[in-house]
Amino acid sequence: MTIILNVNGAERRIDAEPATPLLYALRNDLGLNGAKYGCGLGQCGACTVQLDGKAVFSCLLPVAALEGRRITTVEGLGTLDKPGVLQQAFETEQAAQCGYCIAGMIMRAQALLDRNPSPTETDIRAHMQPNLCRCGTHMRILRAVRRAADMMSGKLAILESGQ
Amino acid sequence: MTANTATQLSRRTFLSGSALVVAFSLSSRAFGQLAGGGEGSAGPAVVAPHLPGSLKSSPMLDSWIRIDADGKVTVFTGKVELGQGIRTALIQVAAEELDVPPTAIHLITADTVLTPDEGLTAGSHSMQDSGSAIRNAAANVRMLLVREAARTWNVEPAGIDTDGMGNLTGPEGRTLGYGPAASSLSLHVEAAADAPLRDPARYRTMGASLRRVDIPGKLTGEPAYLQDMRLPGMLHARMLRGPSFGTRFQSSDIAAISALPGVVKVVRQGNFLAVVAEREWTAITALRKFQDAPFVRTASPLPSGDVAATLKGLPSRDIGILDTRNATAPAASTVNARYSRPWLNHGSIGPSCAMAHFQDGAITVWTHSQGTFDVRRVVAELVGLPPEKVHAIHVEGSGCYGQNGADDVAADAALIAWDMPGRPIRLQWTREEEFGWEPLGPGMLTELEASLDTDKRIVTWKHEVWSNPHNNRPVGAGGVIAGGEVAKPFPVPEGKPIPMPEGDGSRNSNPLYDLPNMQVTYHFLKDMPLRVSALRSLGAHLNVFSIECMFDELARAGGVDPLELRLAHMKDERAREVMTTMAGRFGWQSRARGDGVRGCGMGFARYKNLGAYCAVAMEVEIDRETGRVRVRRAVAAVDSGQAVNPDGIRNQIEGGIIQSLSWTSREEMTFSPDRRTSFDWSAYPILRFEDMPDTIEVHVLDRPGLPFLGTAEAAQGPTAAAFANAVADATGLRLRDMPLSPERIKAALGAI
Ligand code: FES
Ligand code: FES
């Protein structure tokens, strides 16, 4: 069946079985790598994307239910040449080891900062709770989210481009 | 099109459009006991024992470094990026000793066609093996370039310098680029052992926290992982296996699965079964249909007793590790204690994945295994091809922390591809499969006895450890799951202990402390009731936990400060400095004393007594209602020798502290007689954000010019002990069996 998805601001037409979870449509039909397969069970957050601004597990969402909804992946936040605020903050804090969980972390954090630009430490920890990291990069991820909040509020500078 | 050009084309297709070519072109691997990996594997032969690191097995300079006429530098390593930042650190090493900017270096990581075989990327060996090799090879190349310039200009080599930008500089303002100088040189020469290394006082790149080259792409959705590879004509596969190792589904309707629309084939080789489909979701749907059947156990039942009962019930081969006799004062007080840890899962966030392509009689396998050259050996034996017809290429996966499903999935993918020539096969293991089938970190047991004299000196030290082999890395088809499933199964090789000084279950059972009357015995248990292999730090996790808990138990028995007792028995100056640095930063003397709720503890080890020194202290707060422990702060000090990238070291130690806290306080693989019952994250919880310490500080000691010491696993043991010691300090209760979970702490508190 043909489904039209709004991904990172563009209408994308895919041909998929209606029950296909969004994760596989993003990765295989649209060639987007940001959302990762971690469990397919809604338990780890590796596949986190934003749906109408909210952080969701793309591994659990059938594409048929998504027409007309706004989907954002980490590719929608910035690029190598023009990284977004959270991407810059994660780079500055060197907040990755293997990095497999990181795109999901960024997308979950984006959903928080969209609705609460100056979260407390407790807010950040509670909000990030659904996403797992096995390398133990948590302290750096928390620092990066705080840095991004400070960048958005003007306490820290945002770079015009990545370099 | 030949297989080779197909491979190259495919690889190029995969890489094209990626600004991350550098990220993909760097990677690595080590060998055997002497120089590499430290965890078995079929490492390469040592041919030049006098040379440093992996130059011992690959002594020719052009195995490591090539310089084009235009000055472009390519560096080769047999090690691989696992998220530990080795790619960046090796670029820094090469840049420093060649004296070029790091951006001038293109690093190629483990590839059976392109790079030296450096055995496994494991055991915190990469800097020692590959870092030392590249450092010395680069120094050799720089020496040859200087000589070449001297010859060209007809001046003494002593008057020639390099400018850090890839140029040689000589008297009267003469300059010569590396490219032109190299074009009249052959690097196909053996390394000299004494090529001059650069003066640490003049370092430009080593010792700086260069930002990791692989991170930007990982933050922006560039293709950074094997999971992100898409080859033209690629098919998606899923294995059709039972719920855990040693099981299979009964009476599944294979014909019905084959007939599902979009299914290309069900591959069957003996008991090896996989479904291959055009689309990934179809393969998953087929797998679910297959699983809708009862399963049977095909191996002996899993053990039902606790760790101690299970391990003590197995036949043991006793290996003496230490036996020293000294005259001492008589013992005044003696402490006996038994410590254990359960079986643990590696818990990689990305389940294992592999790609394989069989065409024109040759097979290419893209793998995130820690042993790229072992993957070639395994696949060659499994499908019956000569090794030169198998090309294994490392591509990064999720962090692995030891032998997860990576080797198995690579063999699985190769076997499927072999059955379906011409089409690249992408095989993704499921989360449940990773939990159910990967080799676990072995359960272990120790029993210690130690005595103090009236002067609070330790006068006897006895340590016994019971463990399965941690060293079951596959070097042939019998070591992977598929090898046991094919029509003519390959025998599973017998597990062997890794001899000291590296050790496996015995790793770090030999205390670095200066102790008299030491008796240390390794009860090596070759029969494995659960499938096990290497998990980060191997036996050091429990052995260091045991030694460092025993120090605190003795300190308590003798009424001595735990740090004082350690320092009183430590002669190694670097160990002392790591402990005192940690203590100073932590404020050990003025720490909160155990009051029923708050407490502090420390742990120390030098990894394998050969690698990095690491001391960790932490302050905890116990919720007596729930048994939950909040780590208020953790402070670590580490001495890794010459620090190539201090922030990289901090990142590894922070990660090690968090991972070890998770193992030690929360994790346990559960099983019933018929299967593993920890099959997902709800049945195998790990620490999450709200469980994190308030702060973690890592202090890296500066050791300019000293040899590199492996760091990646150094925090696992000290963290575990610091946690248990802090809990004991806070509560007065000594918990000795991992996990020190909230439930156990609550139960212990309730009992007093
Ligand atoms: S992959 Fe979706 S939550 Fe784990
Ligand atoms: S950085 Fe590896 S899982 Fe988070």
Image: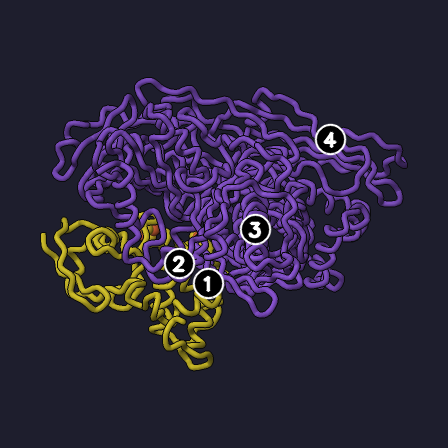
Chain identifier of the residue bearing label 4 in the image: B
Disc 2 residue lies near ligand 2 with CB under 8 A: yes
Disc 3: which residue = B144
In the image: residue A143, left or right of residue B260: right
Q: Are marks 3 and 2 in contact (CB under 8 Å)?
A: no
Q: Amino acid at mark 2?
A: Ile
| Label 1 to label 3: alpha-carbon separation | 45 Å
Q: Quadrant of the N terminus of chain B?
A: top left
Residue A78: x percent and y percent? 32, 68
| Label 2 to label 1: alpha-carbon separation | 8 Å
Label annotation for residue B322: 4
Residue B370: x percent and y percent? 45, 40
| Label 4 to label 1: alpha-carbon separation | 44 Å
Chain identifier of the residue bearing label 3 in the image: B
Q: Are marks 2 and 1 in contact (CB under 8 Å)?
A: yes
Disc 1: which residue = A141
B481 vs B677, nearest the viewer: B481
Q: Residue furthest bottom?
A: A154
Picture quarter containing residue B232? top left
Colour applied to chain A:
yellow
